[in-house]
Image: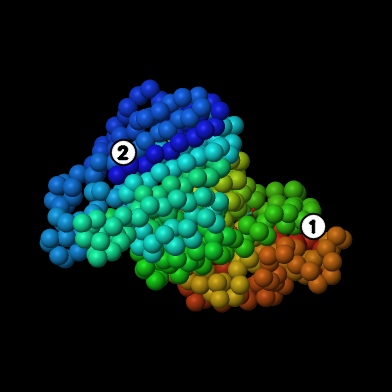
Amino acid sequence: MLLTISTTYSPATDLGYLLHKHPARIQSFGLTFGQAHVFYPEARTEKCTAALLLDVDSVGLTRRPHGQFAENFALAEYVSDRPYVASSFLSVAIARVFSTALSGKCKQRPELVETEIPLKAKLSILPCRGGEKLLRRLFEPLGYTVGAERYMLDPQFPDWGQSRYFTVTLENTCQLSELLTHLYVLIPVLDDEKHYWVGEAEIEKLLKHGSDWLAAHPEQEAIVRRYLKHQRRLTHEALAQLREEDAQETDEVGQAYKEEQIEERISLNEVRLAAVTEVLKTCGAKRVLDLGCGEGKLLRKLLAEKQFEEIVGMDVSHHALKIAQDRLHYDRLPEKQKKRLHLFQGSLGYRDKRLVGYDAAAVIEVIEHLDVPRLMAFERVLFECACPRTVVLTTPNIEYNVKFENLQAGHFRHKDHRFEWTRDEFQSWAAGVAKRFGYTVVFHPIGPEAEDVGSPTQMAVFTR
Ligand code: SAH
């Protein structure tokens, strides 16, 4: 199967920089299911075309122990279309061969990555379950002009009708990384089959590559369902996370700043982070989680402390994680530091094996973003399933709001806050959680204490 990508951007040969593949060379890559070759059929200043030719080892595939693409029907292995059509094999090849371009990086020419350039991709042969209609419904909302040529099942027997195979052209003026990302996600969606087992990790992949465009895509549900191979639980989880992420991101713009102003956050935030870091240090934790890590302010503090051997930042918002990654200069960290830090997308509303086995968890200014059903799910996710020995959790103290001059009466500090609690409310919630899940809990005020209303932030430290 063949994917070509052409541009008429001037100079068109810049495509070589973007793809990290020199136009004058033919390069081959060994993959578990065959070989991928990259070459340029044309490389002129006016027009440049790169080709990714995927040569799937059809014999090797049938010998795989669990017949990766065959159903129980043995003959299916020999009459399968898999070696000849664009499918999840092609997505894997794109991720492997064009990984830097897919992630939108180019050290030598960073400005080029950001540039929208005229691009044309041609795919032969692409199976489309759902036909040309679906093909258009998937790509047109993303700005593509779609061309499709459908093949007969057998030209000698026109009565057999049309096949589901197409040669497809997709034209758009966009960043190359966007085109690659759309292909990476949507090729398997059109094919509606995957050569590998689909599990939780696929949600992460989908959200990683789809977070910027999927939330607003009119076919979001069909895309997620097909990408996750119609597994209802995974589909439900991914859609919920996309919506949560979308809500967080829309809200975050401007809001964080507002909350910062209201709380004079620069100083309060510093005090809060110092208090949390101190608790994590004195409990002797070596491996710590920062859940709802946001833009990574606590992570930065934790990285500076040698005691912490492994630091994990998780957030439902990809956007926040991207900012965290930039602010921590993740790409430029020395290898040793990089190994200590892991950032991943996930939601506190769902059990997650990746959170198990840590000494301590920080949940700083996060619970007030969860609505009641999700807060209840969160309690089990953290205290029952992940169950670190220590949990440090902070939330605003609503009693203190009267002290903020620039906060209107009756308003929360942040538009996305679902609630803000009094000290009594927080303490009775935390005591209930501690009792149900076998923890003890103590409370500390954070920030200046005022008469009658306490301190702006309240902190609970749970220990088991
Ligand atoms: N802990 C950080 C950020 C607090 S803002 C700090 O103190 O600076 C709240 C963060 O919680 C946001 O980044 C938001 O994306 C994240 N969040 C909201 N709901 C979440 C959920 N269900 N799972 C994980 N993170 C969530």
Q: Position of residue 153 (x, y in %)?
A: 25, 59
Is 236 positioned to the left or the right of 251 in the image? left
For the N terminus, give its image quadrant. Answer: top left
- Placement of 145 over or under 42, stated as above or below: below
Which label lies toward us, 2 or 1?
2
Is 248 positioned to the left or the right of 313 in the image? right
Which residue is at the far top? 24
Q: Position of residue 194 (x, y in %)?
A: 31, 57
Amino acid tagged 1:
Ile
Amino acid tagged 2:
Leu
Residue 379 in view in this figure: no
Question: Residue 234 appears in which quarter of the rendering?
Answer: bottom left
View quadrant of ligand 1 = bottom right
Question: Residue 36 appears in which quarter of the rendering?
Answer: top left
Residue on which disc 2 sits:
53
Residue on which disc 1 sits:
262
Residue in view at x 56 percent, y 72 percent: 375
Q: Is mark 1 within 8 Å of ligand 1?
A: no
